[in-house]
Image: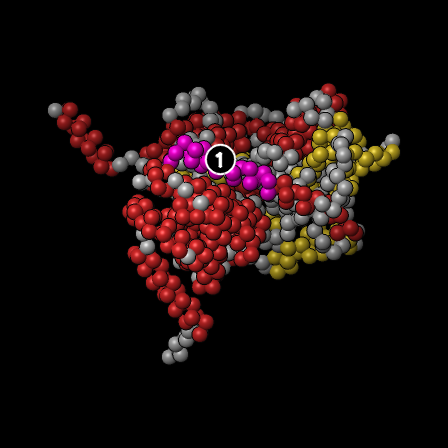
Amino acid sequence: MGTPARSSPRSTARLLLALILVAAAAAGIVGLPHGASGLGALHQRLGELRTQQGAHPLGFAAGFFALYVAVAALSIPAAALFTLAGGALFGLWQGAVLVSFASALGATLAFASARWILAPWVRARLGSRLEAINTGVRRDGAFYLFGMRLVPVFPFFVVNLAMGLTEMPARRFYWVSQLGMLPATLVYVGAGTRLARIHDLRSIASPSLWVALALLGLLPLAARFLLRRIESARRLARWPRPRRFDRNLVVIGAGAAGLVASYVAAAAKARVTLVESGAMGGDCLNTGCVPSKALLHVARKVHAMRHAAALGIASAPPVVDFAAVMRHVREVVAEVAPHDSVERYTTLGVEVLRGRARITSPWTVQIEGEEGTVELSTRSIVVAAGARPLVPPIPGLDQVGYLSSDTVWGLRELPRRLLVLGGGPIGCELAQAFARLGSQVTLMEMQPRILVREDVEVAAQVEAALRADGVELLAGHKALQARVEAGERRMLAQGPGGDVEVVFDTLLCALGRAARTQGYGLQELGVELRANGTVQAGATLRTNIPSIYVCGDVTGPLQFTHVAAHQAWTASVNALLDGWWSLKSDLSVIPWTTFTDPEVARVGLSESEARARGIAFEVTRYDIAELDRAIAEGATAGFVKVLTPPGKDRILGATIVGAHAGELLAEFVLAMRRGLGLGAILGTVHAYPTWSEAARATAGAWKRGHVSPRLLRWSEGLFAWRRG
C-alpha cells in the first residue's frame, strides 16, 4: 500500500485561517445589524453614537475606521449601512475620506486572503483555463475592475474574492478599488447625512439621489473612454505626433479588404489614400477566387461533355486547348478588373497611389513610387496587406522548380504529370480541375486525409470524386526531398507503408497562405504578431499601436474574401472614429465553400468540432438523392447535415455536400444569423422543383424526428373515434 499524502504546514495554515475567517464572518453577519432592521437600529441609536463621538472624537473615528475595515475584509454584507452611518456621524467630506480608505483597505485584505487561501486550490484545478483569464486581466483587468466598482453589478465582496484568484497585483487592485468606489461612496455618504430623516431604505431615494445614481450609470462609459485615451497616449508617447494630418486614413493593400476599407472611408467623406504596389484587386481577382472559379467552370464543362452519353447525347470526346483555356481565364479576370480599378475608386473619392508603402510612425506612411517618394501624415492606418502562398522547406525544391496558387496562372501548356502538395480546399480544387482537363494528377497530403477541417464523411465524398476523376491520392504522406534524376523530377515522401517516390513534370504547392507582415514597417514599430505569423488584433481590429488597424488575411483567423470584406468595414469605421466609438467584428456565423465537384459548404459547427468542445447536439441528415431536382439533373451525390441542440430546432451548424452547395447554404446562414430555427425554414414556402427545397426537406426530417409518440397515439385514437 502507498503512503498517504501528508498536508504541508502551509496548506494546514491556509485551512486553519480559512476556518477562522469563515467563523468570524458568520459571527459578523449574525451579530452586526444590516438591512432595513439595521437601518432602524442605527436611526434609533444615532443620538447615543453622536454623544460618544463628541466625548472622544479621534478614538471614535479610529474605531469606526477599524470596524469598517474588518467588515469589508470579512466580506460581511453590511457595507451600505456603515457607509450611511459614516455620512450621518462625520458629515460628507470627513465621512467620505474615512469610508473611502477603509473600504479600499478592507477590500484589499479580502483580496489578499482569497489569493493566499483559495488561489492555489483554484490553480490546481483550472490549470490552463485560468491562464486565459489571467491574460485578459493583465491586458484589461484594471478597466473591468474599475467598471465593476463604479456600477456594482456584482456585490463588492464577490469582486474582492474573485480578483484575488487572478494575477492582478495587489497595489493595482487597491488604487483601482479606491478610485472606482469613490463616486458611489460620495453618493451613499451624502445620503447618510440625511439619516435623521430616513426611516426605511426606500426613503433614501430622493430626486437628487436618483440623479446621482443616473450619473453613476454613465461613469463606466466615461471611464472606458478615459482609460483608452490614457493607454493610447502611453503607447504612442515615443513618437512625435503631427500638429495636423494630410489624411484621415491611409489603407495599405488594394485587395478585397483594402478596397472595402477605402470605399467605406470615401463614402463617409473622409480623405483616404489607398496604396498598392501590385495589381489592383489583390489575390482574389488576379490569382485566387476569380481565375480559379473560371478554370473550375471550364473543367466542369469538359467533365459534362465526357459524360454526355448518359443523357442520350452522342458526341466525340472533348479536345482541350489548354492555352485557349488559360486565355479564357485571363479574359474573365480582365472583365472583372474594372470593378477594382484605379479609375473606379478614384471616381468613388479614393486617392489611389501606386508604390510600396512603409509605415514610419503611427501617423506617417512613406510611399515609394515611380515618380519618387512621398510621406503622408494620417490620423489612422489600415493594414490590408493580405497573404502569400506558403512554400514548404523541402530540400531540392528550388532545383526541381515549383508553382504556387499565385504563379500557376502563367501556365500555357497542360502539365502531363502534375504533383499537388496539399489536400486542403485549394489543393483539392486545382487537382480535380487539372485532372479533368487531362493531366495525370497526384495529390499528396501530410495529414491522414484530405480536408481535415471537415467531418470524415464529408472528406470521403470529395475523395471518392477525386479518384473517379483519375486523381491519385497519397494521404498521410510527408514530402521529404525533391530532386532531378536522369532528367526526371522526383519527390521522395514518407507514408504509412514506407517511403514512396513520385515522378512528375510540374509541382504545385497548395499548402495554404502566410500573412504578409514583412517589409513595410510593422516590426520596427513593434506591432505584435501571433505565433502563426498573423498580426495580433482584437474584435475591434486595432493592433497594440492604437492608430493602426488590420483586416483580411494579414490578421485572419479565416482567410476568405467575404471575411476580409466584413473585417474591412469594421476596421475602417473604427479607424475613422479613432477611439470615440468602436464596432466589433463578429465571426460567429461565417460560411465557407470548397468548390470541388461535389461542392462542400459549411457554416457553424461540424460534428467533430462539437464533440471536441463537449457540446451536446443532434444530427438531422437529408440525402440529396431524395431531392426531385437533383434526380432530374442527375446530380444526386451528397447530403445536407444540420446540428441542433437536443430537442431544439436552433441551428448549431450546417454542412452541405453536393451540387450548388454554396448557394444552398445561404438559407442556413441567414437562419443562424437571425436566430431562426429549422421550424422557420419548414414553414417557408419553397418553389418546386428547386435545389433550395433541400433546406425545407431537412427541416421536415428534423420535425418528423421530434413528434411526440404520446401525441401520435392520442391523435390515432381521436381519428379512430371520429370514424365511428
Determine whether 5 is above or below 88 in the image.
below
Q: Nearer the viewer, residue 93 or 187?
A: 93
Query: Quarter holding the C terminus?
Result: top left
Residue displayed at 71% across by 45% down? 237
Residue displayed at 77% across by 53% down? 484
Q: Is mark 1 on a helix, strand or loop?
A: helix
**Numbered range of the magenta stretch:** 205-227
Image location (x, y in percent) of residue 485: 77, 55
Residue displayed at 66% across by 38% down? 549
Image location (x, y in percent) of residue 589: 51, 36
Image location (x, y in percent) of residue 550: 66, 39
Q: Taking the image as drawn, is residue 336 in sight? A: no
Residue displayed at 49% across by 35% down? 215
The image's colour scheme reads secondary structure
- Crowding at mark 1 (Cα within 10 Å: few <14, some 14-19, many 20+): few
Q: Which amino acid does label 1 sit on?
A: Leu
Query: Quarter holding the N terminus?
Result: bottom left
Instruction: Check disc 1 and report the residue beneath it.
Output: 215
- Give the side of residue 272 with respect to residue 205, left or right: right
- Give the side of residue 60 with respect to residue 587, left or right: left
Magenta segment main secondary structure: helix
Q: In which quarter of the image is residue 407?
A: top right
Q: Which of 486 and 138 is in front in this view?
A: 138
Determine whether 87 is above or below 353 in the image.
below
Determine whether 497 is above or below 438 in the image.
below
